[in-house]
Image (cartoon, grey):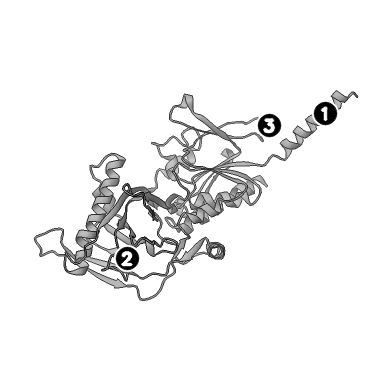
Amino acid sequence: MNLQSKSLIQLLAIMLLQTAVQPLKVAVLGSGISGASAARTLAERGIQVTVFEAGRGIGGRTSTRITRDDDNGRRYQFDHGAQYISKPKSEEFGNALEDWKRDGWVKEWNGNFGSLAVVSDDDDDDDTAFSVKLEVESKKKERWVGYPGMHSICRNLLHHKNIRVRLQTRADAIYNNNDSDEEENSSRWDLRNGKDKKRQNHLGSFDWLIATDRNSGAHFRKDLSSANVDEFRNGVRDIRSIKSLTAMVTFDEPLKLLRNIDGMEFVDPKGSSSLGWAARDTSKPGRERTDGRECWVLQSHPAAANTVLRGVKGIKNIREKARDVLVSDFLERVVPALSGDRENEEAVVVHAVGHRWGAAFPLPSDEYAEMDSQLIRDRRFVACGDYFGPLSGRVEGAYLSGISAAEKLCREIE
């Protein structure tokens, strides 16, 4: 055998060896808690994971919003989605939370909390008038937040040598129906992005696909329109959700009237106010400011979003409306009602931004409440998210669903 033949044989042997040891590749759509927990679980088992996130930052509804003042460029930070993690209801999540505490990913929010009962003044000629009663929480409850921002949990979960994250990338998944024996081990999923199908960018080929956003299966989204996963798409269309509005507000100085309260839930049976929750964001660990300014997050109650946004179109107009209504209710109605004097608190807003969560609180069907995740075996597809399981809409529910999805996938490849 001549030298050239030996070299060719050696080259073929190396190529075969590389093919044999090539790790499994998984694509995850979404970088929220469920996607991050699934990705981390797979990565720790040697699987190569690519996470595609359509937004500008990691975290989904646990993302941290960073804004800047147009005049002086000051930086403001807000937890504009999930506000905190409460006491775990499952042993598995309790163990995870203990790990996050140990590693410094979360810290306890040791603030003062209460509920604000809103009572309409039926005898008043002004149909917007109401009175309020603040009740401070008597028994301390556990509240944990990501440190130094809520997004820190997902950011740390995704920090692994086997995980790659691509931000601002909405991926459209195309399923390759390879049924021959020769192609049994070939990649089944091609991911692309771009509005023009003829000019889409190829993002890569993957063996498995995990979808975490149930809206990926909606008729108005094309993420999974070519994915051949009708079982998933048809199921999630029956899941309703509650929209939520958020206003992120910065005041020039701390609100004196509310200096002893850091978070309050609004109890408002008649819907007299648009508010459902208000929190002093700068009271959370890692959010403290040194310039004397104070950041607050205002969120709507469940019924308010549809009422407030009725007839409003366009994302810019929606955000402005959310901001204006929530800030107005807070400053012109709630604060004066607390003080009894509309001129008692001269709060100056130096920065305010609105946001709408289109599917903030899922209302899953009985079928989804009994599942932690959904495996479609013949498509090498798994769905997970906070719309699965009995703890829907919670960080804990999303985490457990992501772990479930990863474990189902791993069992399939063993």
Judge the density around disc 2: few (<14), some (14-19), many (≥20) Cα neighbours within 10 Å: many
Q: Nearer the viewer, residue 218 or 235?
A: 218
Picture residue at 30% right of the left edge, 52% below the top = 351
Picture residue at 50% right of the left edge, 51% below the top = 34
Relative to 187, residue 92 above or below: below
The kind of secondary structure element at disc 2 is strand
Picture residue at 42% right of the left edge, 43% below the top = 215
- The percent position of residue 301, horizontal first and vertical second, equals 29, 57
Marker disc for residue 327: none
Relative to 125, residue 257 above or below: below
Residue 407 seen in this snapshot: no
- The percent position of residue 210, horizontal first and vertical second, equals 54, 44
Q: Considering only order in the chain, which callout, 3 or 1, is on the residue closer to the N terminus?
A: 1
Tag nearer the camera, 2 or 3 = 2
Relative to 341, residue 48 above or below: above
Q: Where is mark 1, residue-wise?
A: 9
What separation in Å lies between label 2 and label 3 (alpha carbons)? 60 Å
The kind of secondary structure element at disc 1 is helix
Task: Residue type at mark 3: give it.
Answer: Asp
